[in-house]
Amino acid sequence: MVKFKKVIEKDMFFGAEAETFSLAKQMRKKPTDAEKAMWKILRKYRTTGYIFRRQHPVEFYIADFYCHRLKLVVEVDGDIHLKKEAQDHDEGRTGEMERYSIEVLRFTNCEVLENPELVTKKLSEFIHKQTKNLNDLPPLTPGEGERGGEVVNT
């Protein structure tokens, strides 16, 4: 069994249960084409200190992408999200994220696959708006950098 030492900031997962972590791990193994394309976009922000995580547990939800430093969730929505019941669910989920002061940016599969430049522009504008005063952002914490968490086999 693998356990993470208490190097990773506990509030990064907002009380997510073990089952949520297990499901997130499975989901990371089977990304959609749009998620692959978004991941390619988000990886470019690593060099500026904004590390995004794929399929990241937040309480009992799994965010498509999450940057703890920005407290930002990025969702990539397929056609199912056009249905009323899915939109209601998304609205409730966004409300839960906002309860933790997490902002949510949503993009459609089409936007990500067909207009990655616009997606990058919107992300960059959001980050610029959030970081006008860099002193407002918390410093990087253990677990946010390049493989910063220490793993211990037990």
Image: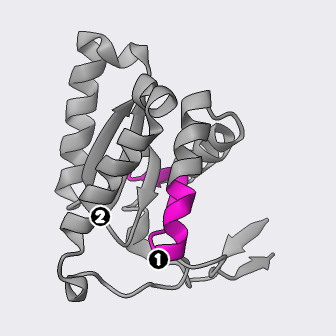
The x and y percentages for residue 110 are: 44, 23
Dot 1 amino acid type: Gly
The x and y percentages for residue 96 are: 23, 46
The x and y percentages for residue 103 are: 24, 54
The x and y percentages for residue 42 are: 50, 55
Q: Is residue 83 left or right of residue 140?
A: left
At 57% from the left edge and 53% from the top edge, which residue is drawn? 18
Q: Is residue 56 left or right of residue 72?
A: right
At 20% from the left edge and 61% from the top edge, which residue is drawn? 101
Dot 2 amino acid type: Ile
Spatial CA distance of label 1 from label 2 is 11 Å
Q: Please state, as top left, top right, bottom left or bottom right, where the N terminus lies in the image.
A: bottom right
Q: Which residues are magenta?
A: 42-60
In the foreground, 41 or 144:
41
Mark 2, residues whose alpha carbon is within 10 Å: few (<14), some, or many (≥20)?
some
Q: Is residue 72 above or below residue 29?
A: below
Task: Give residue 128's quadrant in the image.
Answer: bottom left
Label 2, on which residue?
127
Magenta-drawn stretch contains 17: no
Q: Is residue 80 above or below residue 111?
A: above
At 33% from the left edge and 49% from the top edge, which residue is drawn? 121
Mark identifier at residue 49: 1
Q: Is residue 72 above or below residue 96?
A: below
At 46% from the left edge and 50% from the top edge, which residue is drawn? 65
Count the marks: how many? Answer: 2
In the foreground, 29 or 153:
29
Residue 21 makes an appearance in the image: yes
In the foreground, 28 or 128:
128
